[in-house]
Image (spheres, rainbow, N blue to C red):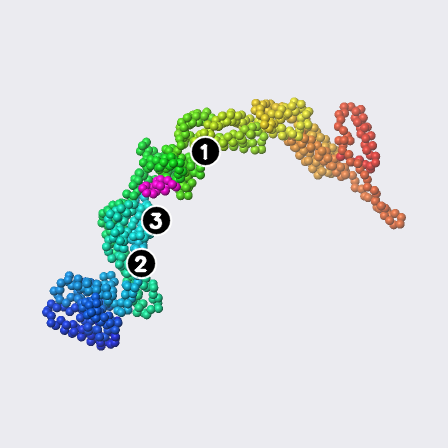
Amino acid sequence: MQKVFNEIRKHGNAGKHQSNGERSMLSGFQEAAQKIQDKDEYALVPFFRFYDTVHTFLDGSIRRVIERCARAAEAGDGIEAYDVDVLKLLYLIRYIDNDVPANLDNIVVLMADDIRVDKISLRETVRDSLNRLLGQNYIGRTGESYNFLTDEEQDIQRAIKNETSVDTAAIVERIAQMIFADIYTTKKYRYGKYDFAFDQMVDGVTVGAVTGGMRLKFLTVATDAVEKSKLRLMTESTGQAIAVLGETDYYNSLEQAMKIRKYVKQRNVAQLPKSVQDIIRDQQDEATRLEASATEELRKAIAGAEFYVAGEHIEIKAGDAKAKIDQALEYLVSHVYSDLDLITQNVESDADILAILNGTVTVLPGMEPNRDAAAKMEEYLEVQSRKNLPTSMSDVQSRYQAIPYGWREIDIAAVAARLIFDQKVTIKYAGTTIQPNNPKLPDMLRKKSEIGKTSISKRQVVSITKMKEVKEFLREYFDVMDVPDDEDGLIAFIVEKFEGQKQHYVSLEARYDGHKYPDHALVAAGIQLMDDVLSQAKDNIALIDRVIKKEDALDDNKEKMQRVEAFFKNQVTVFDAAVQMEQDLHHDLDYLSHEPESNTALNQIRLICVIQSGGNFDYKRIPELNGLMATVTEGHERLLKAKRDELLEIVRQCMEAIHTTAGSADVKNIIQTADTFYAQKKQQINELKSLALLDGLLPPMLQYKDTTVDRLETAAKPPVTPPPVKPVGGGQPTPPAPKKVYKSLNRSIVFPAKRLESELEIDDYVEKMRSSLKQLLNNCDGIQLK
């Protein structure tokens, strides 16, 4: 009681005099006792009796509320006299809510006026009174607690309750957010190894994107009762789970909270009086509490909901909201995805798919995993084939991920891989047939960026007759016995073998670079033939047809290529040596004319090695090249030896002439330089194998000898002092002597080569040379022999 009076002094005492507070407490007990003086010993003093003591010094805003309520009771305006007493009690405990919460139980106790009172009956009386006070806006309710409202609070409460409206659609949308963002946050339901997306809906409001698959739908109290009829729900629940929420106070709590939020949003709170701001702040706190309460009530409503799933009204075991939703979705998945169990074995990676494609997974015939799923997919492709409809892996993935299958994309790829391995379907990528051993095939079967470019179709089987014909031809053409019997193996064999043959021919053709080997056009034609066959590798049937069509051309080319193969295997070395010899002796042809046998052999080599455009090369003559080259080499060696002997003798004569001219003069440096020069020439003479190049050594050797001899002769002469220039009469110097004119002659022309066998012949030759030189001396000052 002391705390009640202290709080009233703080909030409701108009005078704020301490004496008024002290007097009110004393008089309060006295007046309360007087009120029950006529009752027996079982009487109790209801707490509202103490209100009359403090009534006189309360603020007008408080008194007006109580007085207005009393007048309404007298007038019978929705209020009874008992309600006034309850209102007085609520005011007295308004400020001590932490000590005495103003809930129904405490209010019943504080309103009791007799120890023997029937608490159940009193509880109903108090509840009815509180409801009337709430209806007339004299009090407010926060959860389980009731609170007295001042005039300002009543005004705000009335504005929120009666003047602020919230659309039902907005409330339903908020309920949807609370369910799918706070209570059940799962976006995909986990069913074993599968994750199934589902559309989320509350009444008519959809949350998130619509997938068109399963649907989880909640019906709130806002839904019309007709739509909640059992027959209608069982009909509409096909392909979805419908939960009719239980009867809890979630809707009213959320509606009140949203009204408060909307009311605050429409006011410029910062510009309002502080007392009003405090009231609005309390209202915002109340909205927060109401939202939390609505969430909890919503959980209870889901836990107590009626579930209609896949056309049936089902009973769900006890559990919280999330557990019941999970059970409903589990039941829905098992009925909506009725063909899910066709997948009897899941795969986890591309390696598992490659194992299926390569046949490394060992299974007994008729016991293959996912056998029924493969049969279902094959049946679909058969229908597509009969309708002449193209089918991509994107179509297959979309079909079997949807209802009623629900398979994972990697499992769909594994089922397709099983059909590929069994040679029941054909896979094409950008128009090219893909073989089972292609390492990128798993991507083509399941990768989003590739499945649209990948087509899948029922395989068109190659006829048995064609298969037999092609296998017989391949055995003979490639000289092998082991040719695959199945279509995929045969196609892989053809592609591998002809690719290898092409690469071999390409390597042969590369050897023609820088060479003029025979039958280059034949090798190029072989490559073109291989390309022609492989051009049909995109389609199995077309490839086999092309091999059959080109059988004669392939046999003919192989037969002709045997000569080329033998040439590069056994004869190319001899051929290259012969061509090189002909090129090396190109400048020695005039010399070889003195060796008729070698000259004839060289001409034969040239005829054998020449490649006639468009003509047939005679490979049989290549073995003759060894003997012909030996004959040419023998004759050429004889000419080389004679030429070397001739030049070495000239070297000796040159060195002899130089040493003879030097005599005993001190010309050591000149002699050493000359010896080094001719030693180098000897080495060149012994190393060079070209007669033309050997002949080219002669002029510089003779020129060097003449130059060196001139230097030695000049060094041996004593120095000559030029005579002084005497002036001519008149004091003028003597003019310089005129420049002499020398005639340059080549010794090989002046002194022609000739064999001399007697002194008479020598004298005759010398006399002719003397006469010739004298004639050449005419009209010049001298002769310069070079």
Examine the rendering and report whether any part of residue 349 can be seen: no
Q: Quadrant of the C terminus?
A: top right
Examine the rendering and report whether any part of residue 58 can be seen: yes
Q: Secondary structure at mark 3?
A: loop
Residue 690 in the image: state x and y as whole percent.
65, 30
Q: Pointer 2: what residue?
A: 167
Q: Residue furthest left?
A: 40
Picture disc at residue 210: 3
Q: Which of the 4 image quadrants contains residue 689? A: top right
CA gap between label 2 and label 1 equals 68 Å
Pair 3/1: label in front: 3
CA gap between label 3 and label 1 equals 44 Å
Vertical comparison of 621 with 12: above or below:
above
**The magenta stretch spans residue 628:** no
Label 3: how many residues lie within 10 Å, few (<14), some (14-19) or many (20+)? Answer: some
Q: Residue at x 24, y 67 (%)?
A: 138
Q: Pointer 1: what residue?
A: 537
